[in-house]
Image (tube, rainbow, N blue to C red):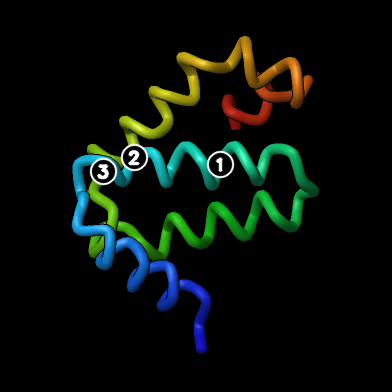
Amino acid sequence: MDKAVNVRRSLDATEQPLYQHYFVKKIVTLAMDRGNREKEAASVLLSRLYPSHLSAEQIQRGFERLLESVDDLALDVPAASADLAM
């Protein structure tokens, strides 16, 4: 089964669309600490979830939260600023 289908089901099961931006922040944060393959996989996943399960506003809000915490994130991922810029 497609992994994106499992993620869609999980997002639907949360029934908390106002908090789905946390999912965006978390998936990008986790991918940033990995290799290019994982970063690309996170990007593809977010693309597959848009717009049916994640709205543009939720994705934007997730990235805003990432940018707000970039200084803390840079302690663990030194290239965080450069990665987010891409």
Characterize the local packing of mark 3: few (<14), some (14-19) or many (20 or more) Cα atoms within 10 angstroms: few
Q: Earlier in the sequence, mark 1 or mark 2?
A: 2
Secondary structure type for disc 1: helix
- Is 23 displayed left or right of 32 in the figure? left
Asked whether the residues under the numbered discs 3 and 2 touch, taking CB atoms below 8 Å apart as contact, a structural biologist would say no
> In the picture, residue 86 is in which quadrant?
top right
Q: Give the residue pinned by disc 3.
A: 56
Q: Residue at x 63, y 14 (%)?
A: 72
Give how far across and how far down residue 18 sits, in percent: 20, 41
Asked whether the residues under the numbered discs 1 and 2 touch, taking CB atoms below 8 Å apart as contact, a structural biologist would say no
Q: CA distance from mark 1 to mark 2?
A: 11 Å
Q: Using the image, determine if residue 56 lies above or below residue 43.
A: above
Kindly identify the amino acid type of the residue bearing the numbered disc 2: His
Q: Earlier in the sequence, mark 1 or mark 3?
A: 1
Q: Residue at x 47, y 37 (%)?
A: 25
Q: Nearer the viewer, residue 43 or 77?
A: 77
Q: Give the residue pinned by disc 1.
A: 28
Task: Using the image, tell me which numbered label, if any, was put on residue 21.
Answer: 2
Secondary structure type for disc 2: helix
Kindly identify the amino acid type of the residue bearing the numbered disc 3: Ala
Q: Residue at x 57, y 54 (%)?
A: 42
Q: Earlier in the sequence, mark 3 or mark 2?
A: 2
